[in-house]
Image: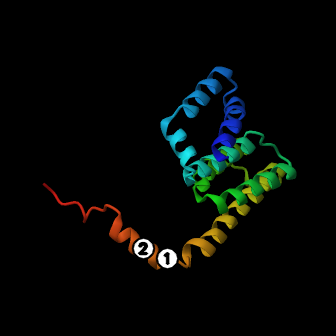
Amino acid sequence: CCGMGTIILYYPTILRLSNSRIIALFSLSLLAFAPEFVYYSSEIKQYICELFFTVLLLFVYSYKNDSLKYTLIFCATVLVGIFNSNVICFALLPMGLYDGWQISRKYKLNFKTMFSDKETKLFCLRYSLCLLFLVVYYLLFLCNHPLKEYMNNYWDNYFITAQNISPL
C-alpha cells in the first residue's frame, strides 16, 4: 500500500519540484526499479512507510503558498507523518531552513517588516507546530517507552557494535 502510494505521489512531486518531465520520469524509474524499494515494499517494512510519508510531505510542500489552509494541511501531514514515521523530521529541517532563508532574503533581515508580513507569520506557525509535534512525539513514545529496557538489552546483545568486533 505505501509502496504504491509512493509511486503514485512521486512523479507529480518531482515534476513540480524540477519542472522537467524527463527528470521526473527518470527519477520515477530509478525509484520503481530499485531493488531495495521492491524488496521492502514486498516485505511490508517500515522503511516504505517512512518513504511514503516523506514523499507525501514533499508533495504537500511542492504546493506551498501563503494561506492558512495550506499551513493546516502541511501541519496535518506532518502530524500524521511523525506519529507513523519519525524519520519525517529529517525532511522538515531542510524545508524549514530553506523557507527561513527565502524569507530572510526577501526582507534583507529587516525584522520590523519581516514579522509584520503574513508569510512570515504562517512560516512561524507552520514550523512551531511541527516542533511541538516532534516534542510531543518524543515525550510520549521515545522518552518513556514501555519497552525501553527490553529494546536497550536487545540492542546491546544482538547488534554488531565496535566492542563486539574483534580485530584480526
Disc marking residue 148 = 1
122 lies above or below 16 = below
Q: Extreme left residue here?
A: 168
- 143 in relation to 126, above or below: below
Please tell me which residue is depicted at 57% across the width and 34% down the height of the picture.
31
Residue 148 in view here: yes
Q: Quadrant of residue 25?
A: top right
Q: Is residue 18 left or right of residue 47?
A: right
Residue underneath mark 2: 152
Identify the residue at image location x=68%, y=22%: 21
- Indicate the secondary structure of the residue bearing disc 1: helix
Check disc 2: other Cα within 10 Å, few if <14, some if 14-19, many if 20+: few
Q: Quadrant of the C terminus?
A: bottom left
Q: Is residue 104 visible?
A: no
Looking at the rendered structure, the kind of residue marked 2 is: Asn
Q: At which x and y percent is residue 116?
A: 83, 54
- The quarter of the picture where residue 77 lies is bottom right
* The residue positioned farthest toward the front in the image shown: 42
Quadrant of the rendered structure where residue 10 is? top right
**Tag 1: amino acid:** Lys
Whether the residues at callouts 2 and 1 have beta carbons within 8 Å, the answer is yes
